[in-house]
Image (tube, rainbow, N blue to C red):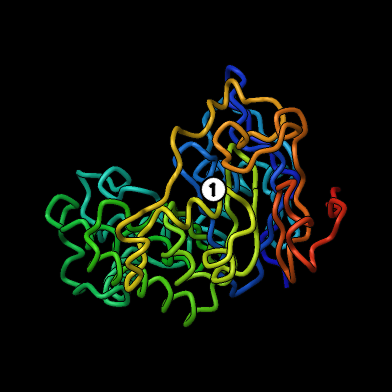
Amino acid sequence: MTLLELRNLTVTYPGGAAAVRGVDLSVAAGEKLGIAGESGCGKSTLALAALRLLPVGTRVGGQVLLDGEDILAMRWGRVRAVRWAGASIVFQGAMHSLNPVHRVGEQIAEPVLLHGRTTPAAARKRAGELLEQVGLPAARASAYPHELSGGQRQRVMIAMALACDPRLVIADEPTTALDVMIQAQVLRLIERLVSEQDVALVMISHDLAVLADTCDRLAVMYAGRVVEEGAARAVHEDARHPYARALSGAFPRIGDPASRFAPRGLPGDPPDPFALPAGCAFHPRCPVALPGCATDDQPLRAAGTGREAACVHVGADTEDAATTPKSRSTP
């Protein structure tokens, strides 16, 4: 059963920056979807748009359906009711997301109280239980954010996201700036909690290896569009789009001397959303671009079983890929 569905989602910031351009994605109940891409490709904007957290003046088009109800069409009272209870978010950088002058237990209890689910005393007890659930002593509820380590603060953010038993959790770079040991612990924690509580997860990261190890499906974004989507492990190990292939190859693989001594990558940066190039937005950096890529944008095409990629080469080098663009249903 589809829990979250994005239909032709577009986001344009004041001044004309096209941050998200016609994204179609869906997440089933209990499923884990990863969204990957470099900084500036629209990943965080996509997450904020899903919960209507973008700045005033931003133009958002398309639909964001949560259990069939369009979040973009909701009245503000209904949006506030959906946040935390229906869908919640773990923001990037817990130190900047937590209130420095309030104890973490109060901040965890706040959404429970705002949604009218219990008394203040019961909310405080719930906060302690949630801290223990994410691997922290209940006594840490009395701590201020600056008294906790980076990994502990991230666990507090996860506890807050789970406070009202949402059906969907969006994790935006949940392990940013954490050392590799703490990163692994936080990822395993998220994976365990999602599995135990049958929560759908959308995880955003620039690291394909992390997403391939954590998620069921993976969508790779570039210049505000999804350029490849499919089973997470398959996309990471055998990417069909040149950008997804470069993103995967940018990280050395343990036990692979070739990747260690000759790491791959791409020169340059994603295009400025205020001045996107004509044709395929990736063509200025693409090592296999054809002359037509500078004028003709590429839609997502079938690239194997359950896979899609937006590249002119897809279909030419994939036996079971369709030779014509796959149709995308729009409302």
> At 47% across and 82% down in the image, what residue appears?
196
Task: Say which of 151 and 86 sits in front.
Answer: 151
Residue at x-position 73% and y-position 69%: 306
User: Badge 1, how many Cα within 10 Å: few under 14, some, many 20+?
Assistant: many
Q: Is residue 115 visible?
A: no
Residue 150 in the image: x percent, y percent? 21, 56
What's the residue type where badge 1 is placed? Ala
Q: Is residue 209 left or right of residue 24?
A: left
- Quadrant of res 87: bottom right
Q: Is residue 230 above or below residue 41?
A: below
Seen from the viewer's position, the closer of residues 156 and 110 is 156
Q: Is residue 147 above or below residue 168?
A: above
- The location of residue 308, given as percent across then percent down, is 72, 58
User: Which residue appears at 54% of the width and 55% of the height?
Assistant: 245
Q: Of residues 60 and 220, which is closer to you in this image?
A: 220
Marks counted in the figure total 1
Residue extending furthest toward the left: 147
Q: Is residue 331 above or below residue 32?
A: above
Q: Which residue is mark 1?
A: 47
Quadrant occupied by the N terminus: bottom right
Residue at x 65%, y 39% (from the top left corner): 289
Residue at disc 1, secondary structure: helix
Residue 108 locus on image (x, y percent): 33, 60
Residue 12 visible? The answer is: yes
- In the rendered image, the residue lying farthest to the bottom is 196
Left or right: 167 with respect to 103?
Answer: right
Work out whether residue 239 or residue 221 is closer to the camera in this orientation and state it: 239
Q: Is residue 216 above or below residue 54?
A: below
Rendered location of residue 299, percent (x, y): 77, 45
Q: Is residue 213 left or right of residue 312?
A: left
